[in-house]
Structures are given as C-alpha cells and as structure tokens.
Amino acid sequence: RKLPQVLTSQEVELLLSQPQCVDPKGYRDHAMLELLYATGIRVSELISLDVEHVNLAAGFIRCYSKNKERIIPLYPGAVRAISDYVRNVRPQLAVEGEHALFVNMNGERMSRQGFWKIIKGYQEKAGIKTDITPHTLRHSFAAHLVENGADLHVVQEMLGHSDISTTMMYAARTREIYAKAHPRG
C-alpha cells in the first residue's frame, strides 16, 4: 500500500494559521480546519456534523460513519475555535431550520466541493507546495500521533478504522522516516 501524503508539523501550523478571524468566513474556516486536524475525521463526517453532535462543555464530538458512532475528544484550541464560531458566527450565517454545524456563505450545509476549494485557497495563500486535499489533514493527524508514540489501537479507534492493518501504514511511515534519518552504515 502506498504511504499517504502527510504535511510536516510546520506545514500544518502554517495552514491552520491562514484563516483570519476577522469576519464570519475566517471564523468558520478556522473552526473547520482546527476540528479536522484535531480529530482526524473524514471530510464527509465533518460536513455531516450537526450542531447537536458537538459537546463543547465536555470537549468532544459525536461522529457518525457507516452507522457507527465514535466519540472523539477535542483539544482546547479546537474547542475555543468551534465555540467562537457557534456562538458568534453561525447564528449570522445559518438559514432558519438548518442543523448543519458548518454552513456555506448561503447559510446551508457545507459541501465537499466547497470545503475542497477552501483548503486549496489556504494552501495557495500559505505557499505550501505539497498538494493538500481534505484527506491530507486526516493523514497528517494520524501520522503525527503515531510519530509521537500514540498507541496504534487508540489511533485506529479515533480514525474509525475497522481493521488495524489500515492504521498500521502510519507506523510503516514512521519506520521509513526513522530509517532515512538513521541509516545503518
């Protein structure tokens, strides 16, 4: 299996710093990117999140995929970004009766294509040469966890992988990086 494209920690920081929290779009985009990297959820899961799937007081989201529920913890920075968006911005944007957590500028549920355009715009603005897709943040989240010693079973659970072999590709990537940095000679 081909190893996934992963951003460096510096590239992630650069990408996450692109949305400026000065207008509704900036707050929304900042919250989406923080949440995506904080949890490693799939883009389909991100755009299908409803407001009631988020528990900011307890610091977690409920994610649904293939009729399975996962509860994923959030770090404080993601809780702050989502809180700011939900409290101050979403009420201005969302059309009446819309349950989606993230809405487009027309107030309706964000689409995959809409989110893809947002990612591409921030990649370009940041001057990042690595091709970034929405899935790149998921791979980066998992790879960085494994590189920093997270248990593969925990990463598997957070990503919602049914088979550990899917998650093991991140360990293989870590071994490859280590081997390049420490060649046997």
Image: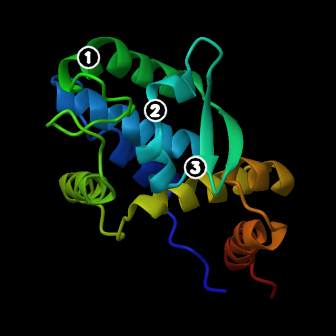
Which is more foreground, mark 2 or mark 3? Answer: 2
Q: Position of residue 84 (x, y in %)?
A: 36, 16
Tags 1 and 2 touching, CB below 8 Å: no
Q: Is residue 66 visible?
A: yes
Q: Tell me how far mark 1 sits from mark 3, CA to CA.
A: 26 Å
Q: Please, is residue 42 above or below residue 72 in the view?
A: below
- In primary-sequence order, the first of circles 1 and 3 is 3
**Whole-percent x, y for residue 96 in the image:** 24, 22
Classify mark 1: helix, strand or loop. Answer: helix
* Towards the viewer: 22 or 46: 46
Q: Residues within 10 Å of mark 2 (few under 14, many from 20)?
A: some
- The disc placed on residue 50 is 2
What numbered label is drawn on residue 91? 1
Dot 2 amino acid type: Asp
Q: Are marks 2 and 3 in contact (CB under 8 Å)?
A: no
Residue ID at (39%, 31%): 101
Give the spatial CA distance, label 1 vs label 2.
14 Å
Determine which quarter of the picture holds residue 38: top right
* Residue found at x 24% / y 54%: 114
Distance, label 2 to label 3, CA atoms, is 17 Å
Give the amino acid type for the residue marked by disc 1 in the picture: Pro
Residue that carries the numbered disc 3 in the rendered image: 40
Q: Depth-wise, is mark 1 or mark 3 nearer the camera?
A: 1
Image coordinates of residue 163 in percent, x first then y, are 81, 68
Of 100 and 165, which appears nearest the observer? 100
Query: Earlier along the polypeptide chain: callout 2 or callout 3?
Result: 3
The answer to whether residue 20 is seen in the rendering is no
Q: Quadrant of the C terminus?
A: bottom right
